[in-house]
Amino acid sequence: MRPLAVGTVLLVLAGFVWANSGEQLLAYLIVLTVAVLPSALWIRMGTLGIPVFPMVALVYIPYFARPALNDSDILLGYSEWEIVVAAIAIALFLLAATVSWRLVLGRPQLQHRAPQDGVDPSREVRFALLGLLVGIIFHIGTISGSFAWVGSFFGLVRIVAVTFVTVALFLIGVTRGQGHLRGNPWAMAVIGTTLLIILTWSSLFLVGGVVYILAMLFGYVIAARRVPWLVVGTALIAVTVLHAGKAEMREKYWETGTNYGGISSVMQLPGMATEWVANGIKAIATNSVGQSAIERTSLLQMVLRVQRETPDHIDYLNGETYALLPSILVPRFIESDKPASQVGMDLLNRRYGLISVDEESSTAIGWGLIAEAYANYGYFGVIGIALLVGGFCGKLEHWGKDAAIISLPTLTGIAATMVLINIELDFIQACSTLLQSFASVLIFLTTFRLFVVHRGERTGSANW
C-alpha cells in the first residue's frame, strides 16, 4: 500500500504544480482519485490474483487525468468547465466499473497465495526463451515481408504470435522475480528482449514495444513483490527520446499518404536506430518535440467533442457501432470479405467529421470505450459499458485468484490486461482482440504442456 500511497501523493502535488486554474486541478483530481481507487481496494483485499481492472484503471491517469492540465492546441476551444464535465463522465465510468468489479470479485480470502505449478523452473526458463525466439523470428519475418503469403489472415497470425511472445515475456519476468532466471539464460533473455523490442519499434510505432516491456515488468512485480525502478526509469527515458524523434523518422520512412512503413531489411536496423535516437535527442535539446507524449495519448478531447456535439448537433447512434460486432466475430476463413475490426472506429470518425471515407485507409483515430458509449447512448451508455467492463475484469480475477502462475486463468488474465490497457480501442476492437488473445493463450498452454510438463506431472500440475 505504501508505494501506491506515495505515488498518489506525488501525483496530487504534481497536479498543484501543473495546473493553471482551479478548474483544471479539479478535473485532474476527479479522474486521478477514481483511477487509483481500484488499486487501493485490491491491495486492501490482499492482492488476490492478477489485478486486471486495477491495472487498466491506472492507465486512465495518463490518458485522461494528466491531459486535463495541458494547455495544448488539442483543448483549445473548450472551456475549463467543459473539461470538468468530461472528467465527471470519466469518473462515472470508473466508479461504475469499480462497483461492478468489486461485486463480481467477491469477498477476500485469507489464503491468497497462488499454488505452485509443479514444473521444473529450468524448463519454464527454456520455454520462455523459446517464446522469445518465436517473437524475434515473427518480427524479422514481418520486416522482410515473409508473411505476405498469408494475405488477409496476417492479422490473425500477428495476434497469435504477439500473444505468445507477450506471455513468454511475462514468464521471463516471473522466473527472474523468483530467482530461477540467472546467469547465461538471463543474459540471453536480456539480449533477446532488447532485440525484440528494437524489432518491434522498427515500424515506428512505440505501443507494441511498450506492451512487451509491461508484460515482463508485470510478471516480475507479481513474483518478486517489488518494482524494478532502474528498468522502469530506463524504459521511460528510451520511450521519451524515441517519441521526440518519431515525427521526423515517420516522414522519412513511412510511405507517402499512409500510416505505415519502416525498414525492409534487418541490416538497416542499426542505422535506423542510431538515426532515431539522434533525432530524438536533437528534438529535445532544441525544444522542437512537437506534440508531446501526453498530448499524443490523450483521449480527453474525444470525450469533450462527443459531449459538446451529442445530441444537440449529432444524434445518438443508439447502438449502431455495437451492432456491427457479430459480423466481425465471424472467422475470416468463413467470410473472407468481412469488415475490418476497426469498422466501428471508422463509423465514429466519419460521423463526427474527423476523417473522410478516402482517409480511412491511411488514418486511424482511436475513440476508446467512454466516448463511443456516449456517442451511442449518452451517460446511460457510459454506465452500461462500465458495468460490463468491470464485471468482466472481476470475473477474470475471481477465476484466477487461486490459480498457479502457469495456468489458463492466470495467463488469460495477463492477456486481457495487455489488451485492455490499450484504452484507445473501441468495443468491437476490444472484443475481437480479446477473443483472439484467449485462443492464443490456449495455443501457448497446449504447447507448454506438450513440450515442458512431464507426462507424470500433467495431472494437477497446471490449473486448467
Image: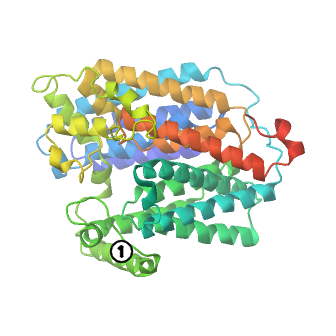
In the rendered image, residue 206, in percent from the top left (x then y), is placed at 40, 60
- For the C terminus, the image quarter is top right
Relative to 315, 16 lies left or right: right
Q: Nearer the viewer, residue 150 or 459?
A: 150
Q: Is residue 321 left or right of residue 410?
A: left
Indicate how the structure is coloured in the image.
rainbow
Q: Position of residue 354 (x, y in %)?
A: 16, 43
Residue 81: x percent and y percent?
A: 18, 32
Residue 202 at least partly seen: yes
Total numbered circles: 1
Q: Which residue is mark 1?
A: 276
Q: Is residue 83 above or below residue 243?
A: above
Quarter of the figure with residue 26? top left
- Observer-nearest residue: 325 or 37? 325
Q: Quadrant of residue 284?
A: bottom left
Residue at x-position 65% and y-position 39%: 410
Circle 1 SS class: helix
Give me the residue at 64% from left, 41% from top.
442
Which of 91 and 190 lies nearest the eye of the viewer? 190
